[in-house]
Image: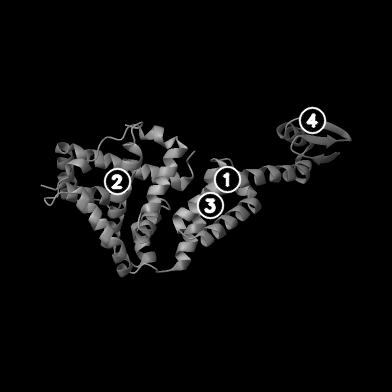
Amino acid sequence: MLSCRQATQLMSQELDRPLSLRERLGLRLHVMICGACDNYRRHMRILRDACRRLGRGDTP
Amino acid sequence: MVMAIREDFVVVDGRTLQGSAKRGLRILVILGENAFHSCCLSAMDANREAELNALRPDLLRFARLQLRDAGAAEDAVQETLLAALTGSQNFENRSSYKTWLVSILRNKIIDIIRSQGRELPASALASDEDGDDALAETLFERNGHWKVDARPGRWADPEASFEQQQFWRVFEACLDHLPAKTARVFMMREILGLETAEICKETGISTSNCWVVLHRARVGLRACLETSWFAGGAQC
């Protein structure tokens, strides 16, 4: 079972490389039972979205 | 014969036609392409220059954030403005003017970073590490679970935040608070949109080191945004 600290590492790496099947399953299981990491994963997507917008000049 | 054109009037055959520049342009389109090119472009240049000047502070802030070097940022913005003024035909309204300028600026910044070469040997990242490991210790218990007061909460309506200038000031401040070398790698990946393979090549760090650095940057940026914006009362 992944710890939250390990899960956050995978949630970062999934943005930079394809995870292995084992890593994907481990992460999916972890976020199903851990609300804090589920939130963290959403935050990672929001960060990426924000960075993309900033990089495109798509800001008010 | 078209004598002159300014933002608000055109002189055609000795008569002054008042109205918006747009109306003037319509008149010139009717007169033919040659008249359009000889007379309209100066007015368009004036408009474009005004628009460029208005966007200059945004461009400069963007360049400073990426390069953390006021002189290099100024150079990148100057080159961008020059390219924009001389390369008018490349802008085809396919996106907003600001988006177009930022795309030019982004390429200038990537060129500058490439020309700086390998300034990030793995050992150089060591100076960034202590602070980040300390950050991880504030977030996690020894067993690797979240500390109670560090547990990520819900972020309300990020789309609404993206519409606010104030959010972007906070976001930029959080990026600026990242340790310099961590920020360099993170911005190459997320703002400039380079693949990790190229970042490794440009910075001379290993792929796994790159992932570690990116993870640290995201941990720090997320924590900063949560504290400075999403937990700030009105947003929650």
Specify whether disc 1 shares its chain with disc 4: yes
Q: CA distance from mark 4 to mark 2?
A: 57 Å
Q: CA distance from mark 2 to mark 1?
A: 30 Å
Q: Which mark is residue B18?
A: 4
Label 3 vs 2, first from the N-terminus = 3
SS of the residue under disc 3:
helix
Q: CA distance from mark 1 to mark 3?
A: 9 Å
Q: Amino acid at mark 4?
A: Gln
Q: What residue does disc 1 label?
A: B55
Is B205 placed left or right of B83 in the picture? Answer: left
**In which chain is the residue bearing label 4?**
B
Which of label 1 and label 4 is nearer to you? 1
Residue at the spot x=22%, y=51% of the render? A9
Out of A5 and B39, give the one closest to the viewer: A5
Q: Count neighbours of disc 1 (C-alpha within 10 A) and say few if under 14, some if 14 to 19, many if 20 or more.
A: some
Relative to B136, residue A32 above or below:
above
Q: CA distance from mark 3 to mark 4?
A: 37 Å
SS of the residue under disc 4:
strand
Q: What residue does disc 2 label?
A: B223
Q: Count neighbours of disc 3 (C-alpha within 10 A) and say few if under 14, some if 14 to 19, many if 20 or more.
A: some
Could you tell me if the residues under marks 3 and 4 are in contact, i.e. CB atoms within 8 Å?
no
Q: Position of residue B86 (x, y in %)?
A: 65, 53
Label 3 vs 4, first from the N-terminus = 4
Q: Count neighbours of disc 2 (C-alpha within 10 A) and say few if under 14, some if 14 to 19, many if 20 or more.
A: some
Specify whether disc 3 shares its chain with disc 4: yes
**In which chain is the residue bearing label 2?**
B
